[in-house]
Image (tube, grey):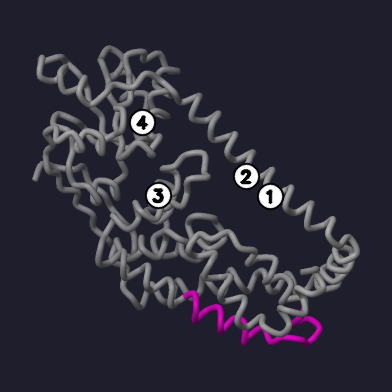
Amino acid sequence: MSPADSLQFLDRYGVVILPALAVAEQIGIPLPAVPALLAVGALAAHGRISIPLVLGAISVAALAIDFVWYELGRRRGARVLVRLCQLCQLSLEADSCLRRAESTFARYGARSMLAAKFIPGLTTVMPPLAGVFAVTRGRFALYDLAGVLLWAGTWLALGYFFSDAIVLITAKASALGRMLGLIIVTAFAGYILVKYGRRRLFLRKLRTAPVSPEALKRRLDAGDDVTIIDLRTALDVEATPYAIPGGRWLAADAIDEHEVELLRSRDVVLYCASPNDTASARVALQLKHTGISRVRPLEGGLAAWMALNLPVRAVQLPVAVADGRSRSAQPTAA
């Protein structure tokens, strides 16, 4: 379909197509919602489509989907978030999705939903995150609707005010015909290859000799002095409220110079939630750069430890919510 045909298609079915694209964006499917919004904005500038009608349709569809995610988060807790963050596998760190969302929500509370739809990954995670932290339904609806209108309205407005440029670009693109499609496909394939290559290089850089769960258990049974640090996020702890006995919970970004000095003369084992979480390898690399050589990540994280039925202790992580913000405390034995 040529760009000109695409504009005609949006002219006829934009009120149906745009809500579908917005929903796809929310659940992590990389469809071109933003270009479609720009195009519809340009059509509106020429009186061919109604912006209020389009905004209304997008808002209804987006709120319906977001409320489903919100209720899942409210009823099933942090496990929903851990599953959702598997959508972030193309990021340089598989765990970055949840950590970034949790940090943003902890800092700004429900207000973070105003900007979440502009940030890949956050638009999917924020609704269930609001449910996990028990943001009231009314407050969630208010901020979510405002976020949808801000996101869609921004791109529609840009298309409206730069309609002449968009029409010119469309005409030029139509003249290119199939060549344009080949360029787009090539560029997209190149993007995927670059992302994959960067991730491989990143993981290679993080590669350091891990300690297996069995080897760590043998050292603990032998009475060796091993400092075990749990690097999971508060939501990871809530999703799996267990920890390796003798371990200490410490956020990855809380390892300051004082902590480094305490760890310098010790054997340190770092662990996170699962094999896909690179936090322990990343922190191990950072600590080695500070001169701490006796530090190793736990192979497979807590998931591998529990899969072997090795002993764990139950923990409780008090998470209070005030005005949509989370306050996490140190996990304590249940």
Check the picture and name the quadrant holding the N terminus: bottom right
Numbered badge on residue 34: none
Q: Calculate the distance from the C-alpha at mark 1 to the C-alpha at mark 3.
A: 26 Å
Marks 1 and 3, the one that precedes in the sequence: 3
Label tally: 4
**Secondary element at tag 1:** helix
**Would you identify the image quadrant in which residue 310 lies?**
top left
Labelled pair 2, 1 in contact (Cβ < 8 Å) = yes
List x then y, in percent, for residue 160. 75, 75
4 vs 1, front mark: 1
Marks 2 and 4, the one that precedes in the sequence: 2
Amino acid type shown at disc 3: Leu
Which residue is drawn at the image coordinates 65% and 64% (left, top)? 32
**Secondary element at tag 4:** helix
Numbered badge on residue 280: 4
Q: Which residue is mark 2?
A: 192
Marks 3 and 4, the one that precedes in the sequence: 3
Amino acid type shown at disc 1: Phe
> Which stretch appears magenta?
43-62
Marks 4 and 1, the one that precedes in the sequence: 1
Front residue of this view, candidates 284 and 299 = 299
Q: Which residue is mark 3?
A: 98
**Would you identify the image quadrant in which residue 330 lies?**
top left
